[in-house]
Image (spheres, helix red, strand yellow):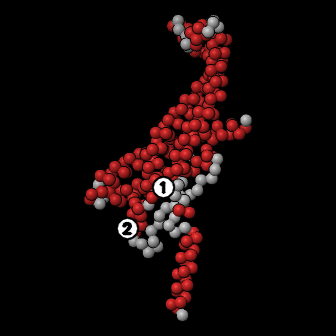
Amino acid sequence: MNKIFKQLGADSAYLLSAFPIALPAFVITVAGFAAGIGTAVVWVGVPILAATLFAMRGLAAAGRSQLSAVLRQPINQPHYKRAPENASALRRALTPVTDGQSWLNLLWGLVNFPLAVAGFCVALSWWAATVASLAYPLYGWIIIRAVDGSGGGDGLEYATRWLGWGDSYAAASLLAVLGGLVMALLLPLVLRGFAITQASLGKGLLASLTESDAPQGPVRTATINAEVTRIQERLAA
């Protein structure tokens, strides 16, 4: 039971906090990509695309940091292409344009947004409806008293009459609490489904190209360095 509550908290926090990250990522992706592609014919768009890809790295890192708690596994850091040490400032600035992970970040900013909106709305509304239903006996009388002068009610009395429970406050409270219990039981399943879908997409796009996929990974780099040292020693001799 403790594990269920812990995962529910992680999924809820993820769905509610992913939207503030997804919104600026979507805006930067759409605006930057459109401006870059639209002006690429005069070469102005290339630096715009590079700046957009650079900006997305920070938002992608923020989105990647959320995945571990939802997927319950460590998330590898991605590999970003680096310019050679003796490269010019212009080449360093334009390196993201030729980097695969940078473009995956841009794709994530586009396709993650609708999932983040749906997850945020469902998490917020489901939590609010569950808490409101379970707590109805504490505040329902205020609603009834407020609308009593107009001859109406809060709507629950129609359901309780249909069920044959009468239209008493106790019957309305019982129906609300029962509905809240059903929503509370479904809450972990619903939020887990939305969270795992969005987090799996994030992992596929934000952590698919790791250091082990780099054309010059740690082992290969060490081998190359050793070979360069050996050649230098031969030339010196």
Task: Establish if 126 lies above or below 200.
Answer: above
Depth order, front residue of 59/139: 59
Residue 4 visible in the snapshot? yes
Q: Amino acid at mark 1?
A: Arg
Horizontal and vertical percent for residue 104? 46, 53
Q: Determine which of the numbered discs, if any, sits on residue 90 in the image.
A: 2
Secondary structure of the residue carrying numbered label 1: helix
- The quarter of the displayed image where residue 2 is located: top right
Task: Establish if 207 lies above or below 6.
Answer: below
Q: Amino acid at mark 2?
A: Leu
The tally of labels here is: 2
What residue lies at 55% left-to-right and 71% top-to-bottom?
A: 220
Horizontal and vertical percent for residue 227? 54, 80
Residue 146 visible in the snapshot? no
What residue lies at 47% left-to-right and 57% top-to-bottom?
A: 101
Name the residue carrying label 1.
57
What residue lies at 63% left-to-right and 18% top-to-bottom?
A: 176
Horizontal and vertical percent for residue 206? 51, 52
* Label whose residue precedes the other's in the sequence (2 or 1): 1
Q: Residues within 10 Å of mark 2 (few under 14, many from 20)?
A: few
Q: Residues within 10 Å of mark 1 (few under 14, many from 20)?
A: many
Task: Establish if 123 lies above or below 171.
Answer: below
Q: Position of 122 compared to 9: left or right?
A: left
Horizontal and vertical percent for residue 117? 48, 37
Depth order, front residue of 211/136: 211
- The quarter of the displayed image where residue 138 is located: top right
Secondary structure of the residue carrying numbered label 2: helix
